Amino acid sequence: MINRSIQYKSKSVLLCLYKTLVRPHLEYCTQMVSGMKVLPYKERLRQLGLRTIEERRNRADLIEMFKMLKGKSSPIFDSLFERLAAG
């Protein structure tokens, strides 16, 4: 939505929009799951079968790299990376 709606995409504008529109959704009710308030964050995630934001971002990066490698996404993989011979 931000990408489609905003023309001026400076770092400061995007950061402000992220903090205002995106981050609150990511953090909403994170400590309000009944009976889990005393547990550490990672344990809450484990019990709920959820992944950390870092893990989700890493997964999304790997998926995007795979798409680029297979030519299903722009930019083309070979325009960004150099392939080395195995061995």
Image: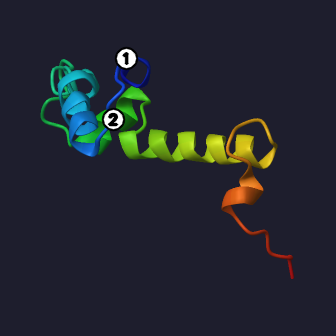
Image point 86% across, 76% down: which residue? Answer: 85
State how many labels appear: 2
- Give the SS element for disc 1: helix
**Mark 2 belongs to which amino acid?**
Lys
Residue found farthest to the bottom: 87
Alpha carbons under labels 2 and 1: distance apart: 10 Å
Image point 38% across, 27% down: which residue? Answer: 48
Residue with the mark numbered 2: 9
- Quarter of the image with the N terminus is top left
Residue 12 at x, y percent in the picture: 21, 42
Q: Residues within 10 Å of mark 1 (few under 14, many from 20)?
A: few
Q: Is residue 63 left or right of residue 77?
A: left
Quarter residue 86 falls in: bottom right
Residue 61 at x, y percent in the picture: 56, 45
> In the rendered image of this protein, does residue 38 appear above or below residue 35?
below
Along the line of sight, the residue nearer the viewer: 34 or 22 = 22
Along the line of sight, the residue nearer the viewer: 62 or 1 = 1
Residue 39 at x, y percent in the picture: 19, 38
Image point 36% across, 26% down: which residue? Answer: 7
Residue 74 at x, y percent in the picture: 68, 40
- Give the SS element for disc 2: loop
Residue 66, numbered circle: none
Q: Is residue 24 left or right of residue 42?
A: left
